[in-house]
Image: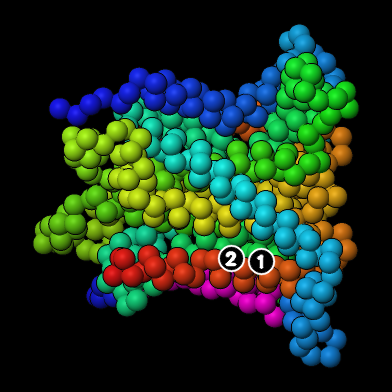
Amino acid sequence: MVKAVPTPIRVAAILFVILTGVFLLAPLVVIAGVSVSESQFIAFPPTGFSLRWYEAVFSSDAYLSAAWISLRVALLVTVTSCLIGGAAAIALHRRKLPFSGALSTLFLSPLVLPTIIYAIGMLMLWSALFGPVSILTLWVSHTIVTTPYVIRTTLAVLSESNPFLEEAAQTMGANRFQRLRLVVLPQCLPGLAAGTFFAFNISFDEAVLALFLRKPGMTTLPVQIYGQLEFSPDPTVAAVSTIMIGLTVLLIFLIDRMLGLQRFAST
Amino acid sequence: MTMTDRAENTLLILPGLVLLVLAFFVPIAQMLVLSVAGENGPTLAHFQRFLSDPYYLNVLWRTVRLSAIITLICALIGFPLAYIMAHVSARARLWLVIMVILPLMTSVVVRTFGWMVLLSRSGLIPEVLRDMGLVGRNFSLMQTETAIVVGMVQVLLPFMTLSILGVVTRIDRRLEEAARTMGCGFLQTLRTVVLPLSAPGIVAGSLLVFTLSASSFVTPNLLGGSRIQVLAASIYRSVTQTLDWPFAAAQAVILFVGILVLLMPYARLSGRTNG
């Protein structure tokens, strides 16, 4: 029989986890606290309780238009990265193409390259070819950085699926399109869904590409917040940030439903 | 009409491949070209300017130094955290995974804002330190390297933890049990069995954290201010403020090469163990 973990170490481990949890979550809790404070200065712990900063957000043109741009970009990115990444993942999973190992590495390379290097390259290329940046620039570049996530989650699901179902469907007379639609696509679905939630979250929260590829009148929510933080942060920034944290919590819940967070954590 | 398997797979992969080449590899090539662009053909002047100016060398050194400190702290916290996550009940593990993923998926801008509130002069942490009589009245942690390290560790710890967790969960528990039955103490087992077996995860996590740390500018800019510049912040300034794009490209190439040099031995090493 193995000796159990010694009690002092057990206590130390529990303390360590609590402290780490406080460290990881403190910034988020503090922002939520500031957002409901009555004080017009950023202060924590908050004084009183008021929702006036949320009202201020919803009556601010700057925030609303930034949110609208972020939402549009994120939705477009979600659709394209889901279609492109899902299709690529199916082909990569079959491993029948020449150089399929190298192709996988190629498709996941945007995960390895620091975003700032890509952002600067994209800005320079776009300016040289097409002039000023537009929503299209953000759409394309966010699709590049989010597609690897869709590929990864889809591949994770496919690797556990039954490879003989597709063969069985073929034997039963299903044509290529039917096999893709009726067998492979349903097999992909949980991974694809989790990947699209990741894609949405990353695009909606992304600041580096958005800071490099911006122009007056095209400010995403994270860029708007960054600008406020550089100059004059007030509790409305905290209210917007809290709304964004809430959205992240919702997406994590959805990903857990689709794929299981445990599985994501160990891949 | 019949279609071969090959054609079907090619059709599936083609949109992604075309996008990747045109919108990812071509832009990077464009950056490389621009970094040596001069009025009279290719030049290394932008690199020369960076490498001969003490100010920029200092920026580079600060970037490397802070990234190393951040990576070390992340590893020191990340390893025990991942080990604990792998050994608790499934239910507790789910909560710990949420604890790590929630900050990971929250926008960096938002998280950094949280630290601005906590570290500023009227913030919670300086206030507590003042009440304890440890620091003076005007003490603030904002615009210091400490603030950058604290903020960056919080931003990057999830990456380290998840990298190590992936490896730790695959370690055969019987090895630990064997070491314990042979008379090893708990900490001795951890040091002689678990730690060496977790090394691939720790190395992978450290490379990831170092890379991300060396290339980030949002948190260093907001917490360190304009006086404490890091390489990525300097690139951002060259692009948006001084509008010196070739110089920005040259700095990005220096960052790029530094990261490649760091990653290359690792890629070769992991390629060998896989193959």
The image shows residue A47 at horizontal and vertical percentages of 77, 11
Q: Is residue B237 magenta?
A: no
Q: Residue B183 vs residue A201: left or right?
A: left
- The foreground one among B222 and B62 is B62
Q: Amino acid at mark 2?
A: Ile
User: Viewed as shown, does residue B65 lie left or right of A232?
Assistant: left
- Helix, strand or loop at label 2? It is helix
- Corner quadrant of residue B155: top right
Which mark identifies residue A35? none
CB under 8 Å between discs 1 and 2: yes
Which residue is depicted at the point 51% across and 41% down?
Answer: B76
User: Image quarter for residue B252?
Assistant: bottom right
Instruction: Chain letter for mark 1, please.
Output: B
Q: Residue at x 54, y 73 (%)?
A: B21
- The answer to whether residue A205 is visible is no
Q: Which residue is the site of mark 1?
A: B255
Task: Please determine whether, in this image, residue B251 is positioned above or below residue B210.
Answer: below
* Distance in Å between CA atoms under marks 1 and 2: 6 Å
Identify the residue at the far bottom of this view: B40
Which chain hosts label 2? B
Q: Is residue B12 magenta?
A: yes
**Which residue is at the front of the view, B161 or A192?**
B161
- Residue at 46 percent of width and 62 percent of height: A108
Total tally of numbered discs in the picture: 2
Q: Which residues are magenta?
A: B10-33
Residue A4: give x, y in percent of width and height: 26, 25
Q: Which residue is mark 2?
A: B259
* Res A32 visible: yes
